[in-house]
Amino acid sequence: LKDDYLRALASYDNLRKRTDKEMERFRYETIEKVLKLFIPIIENLERALEAGKDIEEAKQFHKGVEMIYNQMKGILAELGVEQFESIGTEFDPAKHEAIAYEESEDKPGIIINELNKGYRLGDRIIIPSKVIVSKEKVKGGKENGKDNRH
């Protein structure tokens, strides 16, 4: 009887742990779906702020957009969402989406420009950053009858 009781108790404990883990996964998936709709709005607000900051007539409009932007960034922070920088880091397909490659003096595979920032929730990448990645400079001309351009 005691063995049956201990097995039942262990089984219940495993079920509780599995249920907790499943509920956490469901929570993250739900937040992720909402954020994928929400984050592009933040990016458009960033573009609007950048475009309108120097226009004298638009100063009040700019302040209003900036307030909305700051509120939305605050909501993201409350939800545990972090924006991450990619420029100067090594390209990682799990975190970055390469939009283009450019010849550069940098070591190949280094991110030299970021078109859209990436976002993560905890250790999960929600939206990868869209980046331009360095590639080795091609030496001009033909050597040994072969074209070295890519």
Image (cartoon, grey):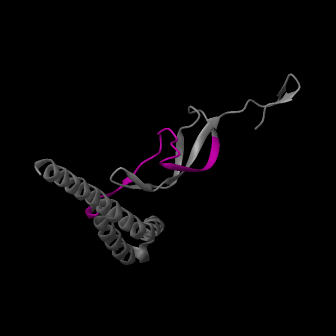
Q: Residue at x 16, y 54 (%)?
A: 9
- Of residue 94 and residue 113, the one placed in the foreground of this image is 94
- Of residue 141 and residue 11, the one placed in the foreground of this image is 11
- Provide the residue span drawn in magenta: 78-102
How many labels, in total?
A: 0
Quarter occupied by residue 30:
bottom left
Q: Residue at x 49, y 53 (%)?
A: 129
Q: Is residue 41 left or right of residue 16?
A: right
x, y percentage for residue 112? 54, 43
Q: Is residue 54 left or right of residue 136?
A: left
Q: Is residue 81 rendered magenta in the image? A: yes
Q: Image height check: is 50 above or below 146? A: below
x, y percentage for residue 43? 45, 65
Outermost residue on the left side: it is: 2
Quarter occupied by residue 137:
top right
Q: Image height check: is 140 above or below 62? A: above
Q: Is residue 87 left or right of residue 17?
A: right
x, y percentage for residue 134? 59, 39
